Amino acid sequence: MGTMSTSEKPGKPIANIACLGGGHGLFNTLRSARTIADYVSAIVTVADDGGSSGRIRRELGSLPPGDLRMALAALTRDNERGRMWEEVLQHRFGGSGALKGHALGNFLITGLAQVMGSEMDALDEIGRLLGIEGRVIPMSNEPLDLEAEVLGLEEDPREVVAVRGQVAVASTLGEVRRVKLYPENPPASKEAVEAILNADLVSMGPGSWFSSVIPHLLVPEIVDALNQTKAVKALVLNLVPEPGETAGMSLEHHIHMVRQHCPSLQIDVVIVDLSTMPVASTRRHIDRAAAALGAKVIYRDVREDDNRGRWTDRHNPTKLAAVLQEVSGGVQDLPERE
């Protein structure tokens, strides 16, 4: 499954979108992207060490398949057969034995990778089987480990403690100050670099900030591609701080963390949900943080409501799709809010 040229299958507003992330945040973004783009590239973190993915990774030494599986599930076709395959990929075994908790899609990816010789070939083959109009790509071809510098875990609140592993980082009770990948400065997959360079729009976030979003910015070749691409680059902020790794973090601090981990990164727009729009003085701080990345801040309604009209902590795929389409044409003349 190579990169599709813009002339092969026209019809949707955007030819080519690349979405960077992992987990549930990336799932929602991909659900948005598939409705507005002819071709969607999901570029996925590979540092998961928990649950079914962690067990497969430890026992077989392969890439953790869980986030890759979720990306495939998000890009299945929106019809009866596509929904059936989504359910198959996401199905988890029950019982009380060794299979308990494993996702069927994780076995499919890992087993096919063993047969074909690489995870990328396996993901492409599954994509063909599912009729996906796009590609799921690991950001690196080797499994990575995440380590965070965390404050507030010791009796002296100023003492920095190293917390190792994606699950531990995501659930820490302390304040995450910085994250690292091991091995440091890992090579990017060539497919991820190509997808970013060929995109018309690149999205980063939403998702677990330190364990799904920022790890991409710790891969030098990914950063180089982001700074070289002619695509519009959009950073989608989370709706609420996540318990654990970003508890208590302001919107401004989320943007600061991106720049702290990747000072050379330049992007075009930061998308913030309208319901979180702060007072004017706070907006100025957010604007300054975004300006350091070369970005404009826009406030749009992208939050999912429940059946009773109450806000949830999830992005609505239809609303987010509309905003991604809006920014894809350029951001210079966009109003701050709707």
Image (cartoon, rainbow, N blue to C red):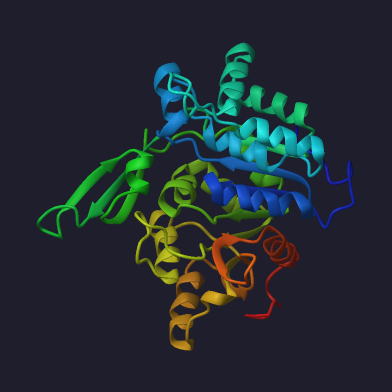
Furthest toward the bottom, the residue is: 280
On the question of residue 138 being in view, the answer is no
Q: Position of residue 55 (x, y in %)?
A: 42, 25
178 horizontally vs 125: left or right: left
Name the spot of residue 20 as percent of width and height, x first. 58, 48
Q: Looking at this rendering, what residue extends furthest in the top direction? A: 115
- Where does the image place residue 264, in percent across and percent down from the top left? 47, 57
Q: Residue at x 66, y 30 (%)?
A: 88
Quarter-of-image position of residue 337: bottom right
- Is 308 situated above or below 118? below
Residue in the foreground of this view, choosing between 258 and 262: 258
Identify which residue, 78 or 60, lies in the foreground.
78
The quadrant the N terminus occupies is top right
Residue 61, x across and y down, in percent: 44, 20
Q: Is residue 249 above or below residue 4?
A: below
Name which residue lies at 60% across and 24% down.
109
Residue drawn at (60%, 39%) of the image: 70
**Residue 204, visible in the rendered structure:** yes
